Amino acid sequence: MNAYIVHLAYELKDTPFKVSVVDPGWTKTDFNRHNGPGKVEDAAAIVVKHTTIGQDGPTRKFFSQDIETTGQENPW
């Protein structure tokens, strides 16, 4: 997956598209019988934040709700 994201971002480098991975974290949903500690609202917030990124935003990155840094970026 990581290699594909990097490759796809490179292929689209001259377009307005940004390609990154966004992991909403272990979220309390029907999929895991509501065992996740995260709220759906918080998971949605990180997805929306990184899918509505501007032209000057990052690309080829991995963001996760579970990473406890300000930017929530994994240095993969």
Image (spheres, rainbow, N blue to C red):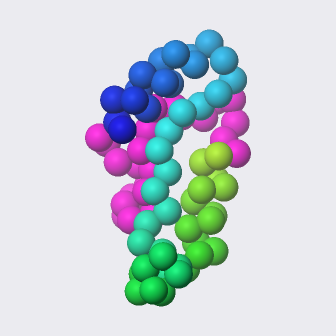
**In front here: 53 or 8?**
8
User: With respect to residue 33, does 60 lie above or below?
Assistant: above
Q: Quadrant of the C terminus?
A: top left
Q: Quadrant of the N terminus?
A: top left
**In front here: 50 or 11?**
11
Asked whether residue 56 is drawn in magenta, I would say yes
x and y percentages locating residue 44 in the rendered image: 62, 65
The residue furthest left is: 76
Q: Is residue 71 visible?
A: no
The residue furthest bottom is: 34
Residue drawn 53% across and 81% down?
A: 30
x and y percentages locating residue 62 in the rendered image: 42, 44
> Which stretch did the figure color magenta?
52-76
Q: Quadrant of residue 18?
A: top right
Q: Is residue 23 left or right of residue 41?
A: left
x and y percentages locating residue 73 in the rendered image: 41, 49
